[in-house]
């Protein structure tokens, strides 16, 4: 199986991030299989070595096995990286489960909450792969646009696991001259940071689209971080985690760049487009849309106030004008900054 530092790794998901990680892992000398959901895309990628739909400027090394066959992708693998959008993660992982041995380590690289159960992605993996257990599961998060990683631009991220040996294994597996990984044992905080920042990014796109300027955007990001920290802490996260790469780092990136799918959703909402029209025109999933509903449900269950999330749900799903949402946020009762 593992020879020296070389690992046999399956990446489940041929979107932009899955393709970028497959490229990175192959460049690091690992034996990589990339499972692509779409049969036609998998066939095209085998012929061209390019993911035309999701990462067209990157050519995958010939050593990467590209397949639509789950058995072929998973045979003899030491490590599996789950990439799919949170809404489809359980279905893909359940399809993979019969081909995964108990001694495999699993890495979640998705950022979201499962809509039906409100579970974090590592919780979902623990359910689908009970024999692997939490000790063999980790989560990758942080400010990581796939296009930037594929261009070899210096990037830092964090890998979290209840078992730091598992986190360090993925740290060694993925780290290279342009991708620096830190470890963390606070899986809850790392996953909530990665999931909830997408909601704030939609709001930030609205701020940009309405032309409200840097004062507004800075206030939004800061108060958004407070909101994320409140819900995370109520679910067992360490507040300090949100000061790191999976918290403020990822939040700033997603809230300030048009490379962010969630930011562009907010821009379009500010221009008066309806959510269905926006999503119908996208080839990739904007996780913040579904996560906003899940986070609002979870906040109500935990009795945690999330005003930005509430307003984003009303804008996206109830047709509230974005400018009205901004006015209502500014008109909330005055309070102490440090009060949760």
Image: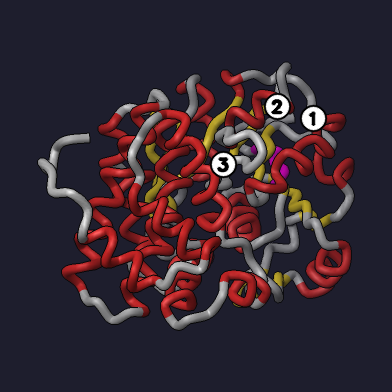
- Number of the label disc, if any, that sits on residue 113: 3
Circle 2 residues within 10 Å: few <14, some 14–19, many ≥20: some
Mark found first going from the N terminus, 3 or 1: 1
Residue at mark 2: 104
Q: Nearer the viewer, residue 46 or 5?
A: 46
> In the shown orientation, is residue 237 left or right of residue 281?
left
User: What is the magenta range?
Assistant: 7-11
**CA gap, disc 3 to disc 1?**
23 Å
Q: Position of residue 91 (x, y in %)?
A: 78, 41
Q: Which mark is residue 100?
A: 1
Residue 311 lies in the magenta-colored region? no
**Which image quarter: residue 105?**
top right
Report helix, strand or loop for mark 1.
loop
* Residue 290 sits above or below residue 61 on the image: above
Q: Quadrant of the N terminus?
A: top right
Whole-percent x and y of residue 88?
Answer: 72, 47
Q: Nearer the viewer, residue 63 or 265?
A: 265
Is residue 294 visible in this depiction of the protein?
A: yes
Q: Residue 3's spot in the image, x, y percent?
A: 68, 32
Identify the main secondary structure in magenta: strand
Q: Nearer the viewer, mark 2 or mark 3?
A: 3
Earlier-in-chain disc, 2 versus 3: 2
């Amino acid at each position: 199986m593992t020879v020296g530092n070389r690992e046999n790794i399956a990446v489940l998901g041929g979107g932009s991030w899955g393709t970028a990680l497959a490229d990175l892992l192959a460049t690091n000398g690992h034996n990589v299989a990339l499972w692509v959901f779409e049969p036609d895309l998998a066939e095209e990628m085998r012929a061209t070595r390019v993911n035309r739909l999701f990462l067209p400027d990157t050519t995958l090394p010939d050593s990467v096995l590209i397949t639509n066959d789950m058995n072929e992708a998973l045979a003899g693998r030491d490590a599996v990286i789950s990439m799919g959008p949170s809404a489809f993660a359980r279905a893909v992982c359940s399809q993979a489960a019969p081909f995964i041995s108990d001694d495999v380590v699993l890495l979640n690289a998705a950022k979201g909450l499962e809509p039906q159960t409100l579970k974090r992605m590592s919780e979902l993996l623990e359910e689908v792969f009970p024999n692997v257990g939490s000790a063999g599961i980790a989560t990758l998060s942080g400010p990581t646009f796939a296009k930037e990683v594929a261009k070899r631009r210096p990037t830092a991220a964090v890998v979290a696991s209840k078992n730091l040996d598992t986190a360090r294994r993925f740290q060694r597996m993925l780290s290279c001259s342009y991708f620096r990984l830190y470890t963390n044992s606070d899986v809850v905080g790392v996953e909530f940071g990665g999931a909830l920042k997408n909601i704030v990014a939609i709001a930030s796109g609205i701020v940009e689209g309405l032309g409200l300027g840097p004062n507004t955007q800075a206030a939004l990001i800061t108060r958004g971080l407070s909101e994320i920290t409140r819900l995370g802490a109520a679910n067992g996260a360490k507040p300090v985690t949100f000061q790191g790469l999976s918290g403020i780092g990822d939040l700033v990136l997603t809230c300030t760049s048009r490379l962010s799918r969630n930011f562009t959703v907010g821009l379009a909402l500010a221009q008066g487009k309806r959510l269905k029209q926006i999503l119908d025109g996208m080839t990739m999933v904007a996780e913040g849309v579904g996560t906003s509903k899940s986070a609002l449900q979870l906040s109500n269950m935990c009795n945690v106030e999330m005003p930005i999330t509430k307003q984003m749900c009303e804008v996206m799903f109830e047709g509230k004008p974005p400018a009205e949402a901004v006015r209502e946020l500014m008109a909330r009762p005055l309070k102490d900054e440090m009060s949760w």
